[in-house]
Amino acid sequence: MPSRAPAECWPRVDYQRPRGPISTRTSEMTETETKSGGSHAPAAEVKQALNSFLHDFREFQADMKSRLQQQEERLTMLDRKSQMTAAKRPALSRAADIDAPHKKALASYLRNGDDDGLRGLELEGKALGTSVAAEGGYLVDPETSEAIKSVLRSTASIRSIAQVVTVEATSFDVLVDHSDIGSGWATETATQVETGTPLIERVSIPLHELSAMPKASQRLLDDSAFDIEGWLASRIADKFARAEAAAFINGNGIDKPTGFLSHPQVPEDAWSWGSLGYVATRTDGDFDAVAPADAILDLVYSLGAEYRAGAAFVMNSRTAGAVRKMKDADGRFLWSDGLSAGEPARLLGYPVLIAEDMPDIASGAVAIAFGNFQAGYTIAERPDLRVLRDPFSAKPHVLFYATKRVGGDVSDYAAIKLLKFATA
């Protein structure tokens, strides 16, 4: 074991007793604190400082509130002044829009045939491109193309009530299941019998080329004040709208869409897939003289209940003039006008589309159609509109050859019914 260090090496601690009694020392300390102000002096100083800070903060708060109120009054005055100025000021120039790259390039091409701007132009992917197509021509800039689409939708065409799809191919196929699977009641011990299998029908809608070729003189194009884009859009839109509206109703399917009236028409009692069923008025070339509205009621309820919720009437203006005079047994008109602007008129509660390409009331004519065209007719189109400038074929005029690919056909033969003005 290690030896312990001697006692002389340990540190020495002296414990000394405080001088005098403890009570005497406490009284001496209390007397000293009382002479110097005690512990209450710091608390008073803190309270005074806090009161001073709160006073300054209130003054600062009042000052900021006053400044904010003055600032709000200034903004209100500026807003009123800007509104009064805007009401008196003429419309601002659209020079910034015209100077956009695609607008300048297209205008240069339409006016002068200069396609350098179109070839070197790079647009964002979300906008319509202006690259050269394989067959020649250029895509119209987005603003012009949208103007044409809006006119097409606003015209009296079944485009507004039909299904419209955008495709990139040369055709669009619609798969329709117009059959049903079989069913039967099963028992615990009996053998289950095999039921029927549904049949899927394929309806192919080819796309056809719709074209327009307006012309303008070169002198007119040289005039910088002439809105070539707006003029071109209005001319093309008018031509396309009229051609489409006629084809969707009466087109024969040869280099144009197939109209729904071009399909075989059979009496509703003998209807089968691939043809359209019709209801006869039982009077040749007119409505029944005693009960004219009965034929329209028969037409409505010849359509299946699953289609009637979204159904609409289609007729021309002359037929509508005859129908809106009809009354029920209580003397109430079957026809009712829309309650608000833009709302279509209604016949028996269903909207009416006035399409001037529908036949007039005549012997054996099919002048009224009723159906759910959203399910019954499909319009397929390419999203691009192409314009080719031709300054040589009609000098001194410049031709603008515009093309658009569109197709249409019946996609569900059970969704459209016809009213035929015949005895049977």
Image (tube, rainbow, N blue to C red):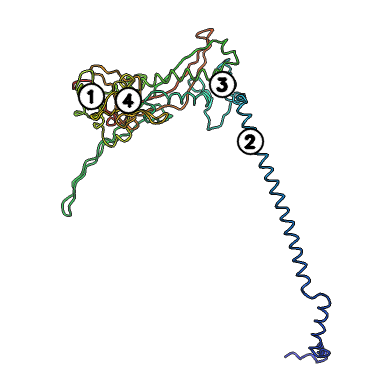
Discs 3/1, front: 1
Nearest to the observer: residue 143 or residue 313: 313
Which residue in the protein does label 1 denote?
Answer: 292
Q: Tell me the amino acid under the disc marked 3.
A: Leu
Q: Nearer the viewer, residue 342 or 393?
A: 342
Please say if the residues under marks 2 and 4 sit with CB atoms less than 8 Å apart: no
Query: Disc 3 designates what residue?
Result: 106
Q: Amino acid at mark 2?
A: Asp
Q: Residue furthest front?
A: 331
For mark 1, does the 10 Å Cα neighbourhood hold few (<14), some (14 to 19), or many (20 or more) residues?
A: some
Q: Which residue is mark 4?
A: 314
Badge 3, how many Cα within 10 Å: few under 14, some, many 20+? many
Which corner quadrant of the image does residue 245 belong to? top left
Q: CA distance from mark 4 to mark 1?
A: 18 Å
Label 4 sits on a secondary structure element that is strand
Q: Earlier in the sequence, mark 1 or mark 2?
A: 2
Marking on residue 79: 2
Instruction: Please state the total of marks drawn on the protein image.
Output: 4
Q: Tag 2: Cα neighbours inside 10 Å, few (<14), some, or many (≥20)?
A: few
Please rate how many residues cluster around mark 4, counting C-alpha atoms within 10 Å: few if below 14, some from 14 to 19, many from 20. many
C-alpha separation, residue under disc 2 versus residue under disc 4: 51 Å
Q: Secondary structure at mark 2?
A: helix
Foreground: 145 or 41?
41
CA–CA distance in space, label 1 to label 2: 63 Å
Pointers 3 and 2 in contact (C-beta within 8 Å): no
Q: Earlier in the sequence, mark 3 or mark 2?
A: 2
Residue depth check, mark 4 versus mark 3: number of the one nearer the observer: 4
Query: Quick one: label 3 or label 1, which is nearer the N terminus?
Result: 3
